[in-house]
């Protein structure tokens, strides 16, 4: 476990925490002392493994199967987590999908699902969370640097879905400022996960566009999220913050 316990006595809910960046965030928040509830869609084995690792190390975590595209299940999951741990301080909206290809080839079902998971779930989870969140809380969205820069064709709908979080983050920061709840949008550049393997042909193109010439690690995004969730970030709100290895430099 992390010796720095910045999040002791805090309760966190991570939407989409079984793999990739979300899993790294769950582990990092737990290692800093937070009790963490997280959702997943289908990776039950991976989710249970994360819970047992955290509990085995003396932490506190539960996994809830809840499809982020289903507003009722998502609301129910947040209520379940809040009742289980007795409150809510931190919401991380991480669940996301990456539809890829020329716009004319995307199906209506792919477009609807992208909007339901990447956009609507952020609104629904934030709405439900703010009904329970204590003063000094944190809402952290996982957007994408593609909101600002989309150098390869095929990502128009994804880029739009992530760009929408920039405006939502600003508006919600205004709503929740009086309650000392901050709202921020983390915009990672390419990070090695199942969604974006660092060894693909596209990855080789992307690396050439980055000042650091390499993909990010999920742990690097998680440590930034933990900082935003912690007490030292109390004056940061309404911001979209890039962590992209110089992708947009
Ligand atoms: P992965 O595909 O590796 O992991 C996605 C996670 O979200 C999994 O835990 C998955 O659960 C969960 N999830 C997906 N859909 C749903 C759903 N409908 N309901 C509940 N949970 C769901 O993605 P990454 O870790 O790469 O990406 C995480 C976030 O970061 C996304 O929002 C993505 O857009 C963003 N991002 C990623 C970048 C990258 O390069 N990797 C760069 C910039 C932003 P399950 O395991 O059950 O499927």
Image (cartoon, grey):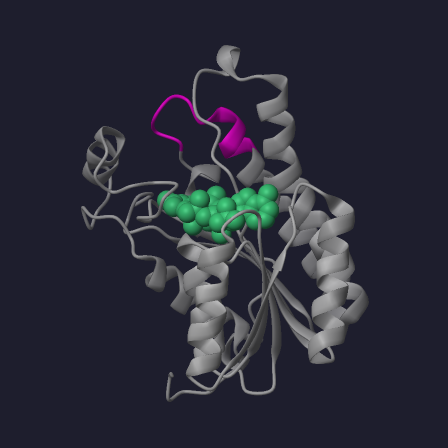
**Vertical position of residue 19 compared to residue 206: above or below:** below
180 in relation to 214, above or below: below
Pick the quarter of the image with the C terminus.
top left
Tell me the quadrant of the picture where the N terminus can be found: bottom left
User: Which residue in the rendered view is the most extreme toward the right?
Assistant: 131
Residue 154 within the segment the image draws in magenta: yes
Residue at position x 74%, y 66% in the image: 80
Instruction: Give me the residue at 53% from left, 27% from top.
Output: 157
Q: Tell me which corner region of the image, top left, top right, bottom left or bottom right, holds residue 21.
A: bottom left
Q: Quadrant of residue 53?
A: bottom left
Q: Position of residue 237 (x, y in %)?
A: 60, 64
Is 120 drawn above or below residue 222 in the view shown? above
Which residue is rendered at x = 41% and y = 83% of the image?
Answer: 57
Q: Is residue 134 visible?
A: no
> In the drawing, does residue 113 fall left or right of residue 127?
left
The verdict on residue 81 being magenta is no
Of 19 and 51, nearer the camera is 51
Q: Residue 65: x and y, percent? A: 62, 54
Which residue is farthest top? 104
- Between 83 and 177, the residue placed more toward the observer is 83
Q: Position of residue 183 (x, y in %)?
A: 62, 62
Residue 73 visible, this orientation: yes
Residue 211: x and y in percent read 21, 47
- Quadrant in the rendering for residue 140: bottom right
Question: What range is drawn magenta here?
Answer: 150-160
């Amino acid at each position: 476990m992390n010796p720095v316990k910045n999040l002791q006595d805090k309760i966190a809910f991570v939407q989409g925490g079984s793999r990739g960046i979300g899993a790294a965030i769950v582990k990092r928040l737990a290692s800093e002392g937070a009790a963490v509830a997280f959702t997943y869609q289908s990776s039950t084995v991976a989710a249970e493994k994360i819970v047992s690792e955290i509990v085995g190390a003396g932490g506190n975590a539960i996994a809830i199967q809840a499809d982020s595209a289903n507003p009722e299940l998502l609301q129910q999951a947040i209520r379940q987590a809040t009742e289980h741990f007795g409150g809510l301080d931190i919401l991380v909206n991480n669940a996301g999908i990456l539809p890829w290809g020329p716009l004319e080839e995307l199906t209506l079902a792919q477009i609807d699902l992208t909007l339901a998971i990447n956009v609507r779930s952020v609104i629904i989870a934030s709405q439900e969370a703010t009904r329970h969140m204590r003063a000094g809380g944190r809402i952290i969205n996982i957007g994408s640097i593609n909101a600002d820069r989309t150098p390869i064709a095929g990502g128009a709908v994804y880029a739009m879905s992530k760009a929408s979080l920039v405006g939502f983050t600003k508006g919600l920061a205004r709503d929740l400022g009086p309650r000392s709840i901050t709202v921020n949008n983390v915009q990672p550049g390419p990070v090695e996960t199942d969604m974006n393997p660092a060894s693909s042909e596209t990855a080789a193109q992307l690396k050439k566009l980055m000042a650091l010439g390499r993909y990010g690690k999920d742990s690097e995004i998680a440590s930034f999220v933990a900082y935003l969730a912690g007490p030292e970030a109390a004056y940061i709100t309404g911001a979209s913050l890039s962590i992209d290895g110089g992708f947009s430099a």
